[in-house]
Amino acid sequence: MRGAVRVWRGAGARLWDNLPRLIVVNVLWLAASWPLLTLGAATLTAYAWLRRAVLEVEDERSEGGPAALAVSEEPYTSLPRFFRRLWWPGTLWAGLNALLLLVLSANFVLWRADPGTLRGALWGALGSYLAWFWLALQPFVLDALAEGVRLPRALAEAVRIVLAYPLYAHLCALPPLLLAALGWWFTSLWPLVGVSVLLLYWAQVATGDPAPRRPGHLEDVL
């Protein structure tokens, strides 16, 4: 619980401090993902660039001592390089998400076709939890893909992390749901800043400290 609270506080501060940058990246993401075929690559590119530009640069400056002055801002001109490198893993990730959405939609139709029965309730509960579990996996999947890990291994590592720290991972899935609710009420949120806010938050989750129960275990998992 404390690990999730620390992540929420750190993410809130970083989101506010980098709001102009988030708006620029969100608008660029919207333009790059407009053909839909590039949606996955644009999303993974935005994630990897924001993690580098905000989290990694900040860490290097805080740990570098006098040499930290030489750490420069990550330029927007590096986005095409990120996009070329992450095109294929991002596309595979988007395809997997589309397939899962199709499966969950079929489950929802099945549940609605059999209302008021134990079978229908079980299908509904299973589909809801699978959606929640998948949401909890996303920060760790994207982080591994951004590091160049192949999708099957990225999924396996993400599952191991979520199972090792279930409370941390599941609690960290709450703010995206809140963001989705805000986006429902304020339709300009997602086109303006919503996607980049979500991705920077996920980067904070993936690189945050879940207060491991066993010292050093998180490093072994990662």
Image (cartoon, rainbow, N blue to C red):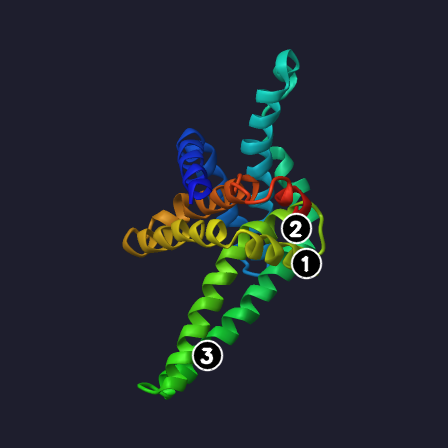
Amino acid type assigned to the residue bearing label 2 in the image: Leu
Q: Are marks 1 and 2 in contact (CB under 8 Å)?
A: yes
Tell whether 174 sits left or right of 63.
Answer: left
Tag 2 residue: 145
- Could you say where residue 34 lies in the image, as x and y percent from the top left? 51, 55
Question: Tag on residue 151?
Answer: 1
Give the residue displayed 31% in from the left and 86% down from the top: 116
Residue found at the very far left of the displayed protein: 185
Q: Find the distance from the CA under tag 1 to the CA under tag 2.
A: 7 Å
Q: Find the distance from the CA under tag 2 to the CA under tag 3.
A: 28 Å
Residue 74 occupies which quadrant of the picture?
top right
Nearest the viewer among 200 and 5 is 5
Give the residue displayed 54% in from the left and 50% down from the top: 139
Q: Find the distance from the CA under tag 3 to the CA under tag 1.
A: 25 Å
Give the residue displayed 54% in from the left and 67% down from the top: 98
Say which element carries label 1: helix
Amino acid type assigned to the residue bearing label 1 in the image: Leu
Q: Are marks 2 and 3 in contact (CB under 8 Å)?
A: no
Question: What crowding class fits label 3: few (fewer than 14 Cα within 10 Å), some (14-19), or many (20 or more)?
Answer: some
Q: How many marks?
A: 3
Tell whether 218 sits left or right of 153.
Answer: left
Q: Eyeballing the image, is 84 above or below 88?
A: above
Q: Eyeballing the image, is 11 above or below 90?
A: above
Amino acid type assigned to the residue bearing label 3 in the image: Asn
Tag 3 residue: 107
